[in-house]
């Protein structure tokens, strides 16, 4: 009798496992038919979403973003998503409405019985606050993870998180795409005989080392000291850059203050030229003016965030093909890591 009770209790607990931890059931190698794939664009990533849908060879889903008179959003999906693999493409850059819009799209699909919901977030906002570095501050990256999961996301796909450990804040799968797949082919077209890779701060050394190791080049570090957020008080170069063409590597560029000071410091130490590759062009405040008036020869970014305006010093590389391949591999249960080999 006790064994039967124990067995019954186990079945009851198993039946109550949360569904958002389960993988989609369809597989190209199984007898189950593959669910329909539906791609939807958020307001912040319309151009990128259109490019992803082109490379994926599937149209964007029909939806409407209505608003009440006070500005409150009411997302409406105008087609059935029941049982479908649904992908919402939306960077959570500013304004805050972009994040709220994504959460509402996910919730609407979840309540419409979507089979599996993936939040495709090319730029994951609020990831910079990933730990308590001073008293009485939030860990906003963890809060974002909780919000996405609570809204009903089964999976998150993003690119170049500010810190790798943010993946651990999620209790659902995270596909962390790396921009090396975009930048390495671009850099291979350049003359790298005198190139030296540099990190604009100590925290980005691991990211810059990937490029230095791949191209078998030297690595230097710019050690910055901040008095407050977005304001660099001092910059020290660790390493020899004499006669070198330096490439600064970072995950994002905000006001561009760090990059501009790093470029000045590197040139003062004897560098021949300085350019930068930064995945996410946040570019707030006077960033455009800072870059155009700086000694940087070029800033190369990805299209994870749309530029507010064009600049002669800023070059944008497309990411749509990489995201479309990652989405296809997710649907077909293939490796994401294979995209970076």
Image: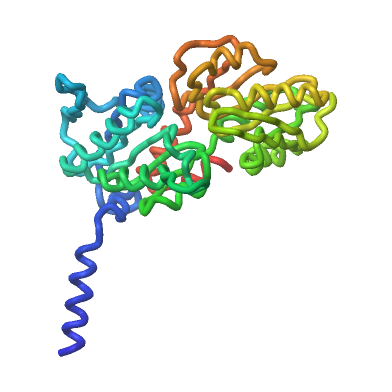
Q: Number of numbered discs present?
A: 0
**Where, quadrant-wise, is the C terminus in this rendering?**
top right
Q: Where in the figure is residue 137, as x and y percent of width and height?
A: 44, 44
Residue 210 shows in this picture: no
Q: Is residue 45 visible?
A: yes
- Percent x, y for residue 299? 61, 20
Placement of the N terminus among the 4 image quadrants: bottom left
Q: Residue at x 16, y 40 (%)?
A: 112
Q: Splitting the image into 4 quarters, where does residue 156 fall?
A: top left
Q: Is residue 260 left or right of residue 178?
A: right
Camera-side residue of 328 and 204: 204
Q: Nearer the viewer, residue 87 or 270?
A: 270
Residue at x 35%, y 31% (from the top left corner) = 89
Q: Locate residue 314 relative to residue 42 in the image: left or right.
A: right
Asked which colour scheme the image uses, the reply is rainbow
Return the residue found at the far bottom: 1
Q: Residue at x 16, y 83 (%)?
A: 5
Residue 335 higher or lower than 212, as above or below:
below
Above or below, comparing residue 249 to residue 209 in the picture:
above
Residue at horizontal 57%, vertical 17%?
Answer: 315
As drawn, is 49 to the left or to the right of 221?
left
Place of residue 170 in the rendered image (x, y in percent of width and height, measured from the top left): 39, 50
Place residue 4 in its image quadrant.
bottom left
Quarter of the view holding residue 183: top right
Vertical relation: 199 (above or below) 138: above
Q: Nearer the viewer, residue 235 or 177?
A: 235
């Amino acid at each position: 009798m006790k064994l039967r009770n124990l067995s019954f209790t186990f079945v009851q607990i198993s039946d109550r496992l949360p569904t958002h931890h389960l993988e989609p059931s369809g597989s190209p190698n199984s007898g189950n038919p593959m669910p329909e794939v539906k791609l939807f664009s958020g307001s912040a990533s319309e151009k990128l979403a259109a490019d992803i849908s082109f490379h994926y060879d599937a149209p964007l889903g029909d939806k409407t973003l209505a608003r009440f008179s006070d500005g409150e959003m009411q997302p409406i999906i105008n087609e059935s998503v029941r049982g479908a693999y649904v992908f919402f493409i939306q960077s959570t850059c500013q304004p805050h409405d972009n994040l709220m819009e994504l959460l509402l799209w996910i919730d609407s699909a979840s309540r419409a019985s979507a089979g599996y919901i993936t939040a495709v977030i090319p730029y994951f906002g609020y990831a910079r606050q990933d730990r308590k570095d001073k008293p009485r501050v939030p860990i906003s990256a963890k809060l974002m993870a909780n919000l996405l999961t609570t809204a009903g996301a089964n999976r998150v796909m993003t690119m170049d998180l500010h810190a790798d450990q943010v993946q651990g804040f999620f209790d659902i799968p995270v596909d962390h795409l790396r921009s090396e797949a975009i930048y390495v082919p671009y850099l291979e077209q350049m003359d790298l005989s005198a190139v030296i890779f540099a990190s604009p701060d100590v925290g980005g050394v691991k990211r810059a080392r990937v490029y230095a190791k791949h191209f078998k080049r030297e690595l230097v570090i710019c050690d910055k000291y901040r008095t407050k957020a977005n304001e660099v008080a001092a910059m020290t170069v660790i390493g020899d850059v004499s006669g070198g063409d330096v490439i600064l590597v970072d995950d994002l560029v905000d006001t561009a203050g760090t990059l501009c000071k790093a470029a000045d410091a590197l040139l003062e130490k004897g560098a021949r030229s300085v350019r930068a590759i930064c995945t996410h062009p946040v570019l707030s405040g006077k960033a455009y003016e800072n870059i155009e008036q700086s000694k940087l020869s070029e800033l190369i970014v990805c299209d994870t965030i749309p530029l507010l305006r064009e600049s002669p010093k800023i070059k944008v590389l497309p990411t749509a093909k990489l995201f479309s391949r990652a989405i296809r591999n997710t649907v077909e249960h293939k490796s994401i890591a294979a995209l970076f080999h």
